Amino acid sequence: MKTPIIAPSLLSANFGLLNGEVEMLELSQAEWLHLDVMDGRFVPNISFGFPVVEAVRRQSQKFLDVHLMIEQPELYVDRFAKAGSDLISVHWEACRHLHRTLQMIRDAGKKSGVAINPHTPVKGLRSILSSTDLILIMSVNPGFGGQRFIPESLERISETRKMIDDAGYSNIHIEVDGGIGLENAGAVIQAGATVLVAGSSVFGSANPQETISKLRAAK
């Protein structure tokens, strides 16, 4: 079993000290940084947009994993690509033409991801596996950090892992976002996740870098 990629979620960072938070992560074992973009329409919260992604890109050499929790994401793919994203994930529930949107992301030279909410059936993703590099399983209802992990998510992760492997796309990452901490990281990895998004558990800990290292070592 491979060591999981840890993607600290900047939604839980101290935005008054964002430069320092990013500098701290640059020295950590985290390989990715996760940026949640919210529009107040697709989810009941507003976070940040292009300027923050651009600022993080200027300061960080890490892989920028940008999660668009917004309506009509196809209108903004090019701008988020130019802002410095390495991977752009869009929600299946927000895309009328999902395949076209994923192709737009790849045409912009970025890796593409599909995110699904806790109530969305996993099996519907079969038809777009050839067009995506990552499937993001939301293990909380999207919109706010600090929520509890939904236990049924483990079954959804396992189902997604089997679907990907059976279709011959074992290179597709499975990312899990919501309520991930040291108490459940091992179970999430065992279920088939390869990327763990961790917000409160990292930034709320006394030693974020040590917590990242422990998450990477979870089994």
Image (tube, grey):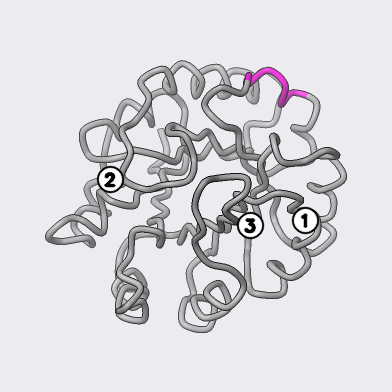
For numbered disc 1, what is the local secondary structure?
Answer: helix
> Can you tell which quarter of the image residue 129 is in?
top right
Mark found first going from the N terminus, 1 or 2: 1
For numbered disc 3, what is the local secondary structure?
Answer: strand
For numbered disc 2, what is the local secondary structure?
Answer: helix
Which image quadrant: the C terminus? Answer: top left
- How far is disc 1 from disc 2 in space, using C-alphas? 30 Å
- How far is disc 3 from disc 1 in space, using C-alphas? 8 Å
Density class for disc 3 (Cα within 10 Å; few <14, some 14-19, many ≥20) is: many
Mark found first going from the N terminus, 3 or 1: 3
Residue name at image x 79 percent, y 35 percent? 130
Q: Which residue is mark 2?
A: 215
Q: Which residue is mark 3?
A: 87
The amino acid type found where label 3 is placed reads Leu
> Residue 110 location in percent, x, y?
72, 60
Density class for disc 2 (Cα within 10 Å; few <14, some 14-19, many ≥20) is: many
Q: Which residue is mark 1?
A: 105
The amino acid type found where label 2 is placed reads Leu
Quick one: 132 or 78, which is closer to the camera? 78
Residue 124 forms part of the magenta stretch: yes
Q: Which residues are magenta?
A: 121-126
Q: Is residue 174 left or right of residue 177?
A: right
Quick one: 82 or 13, which is closer to the camera? 13
Mark found first going from the N terminus, 2 or 3: 3
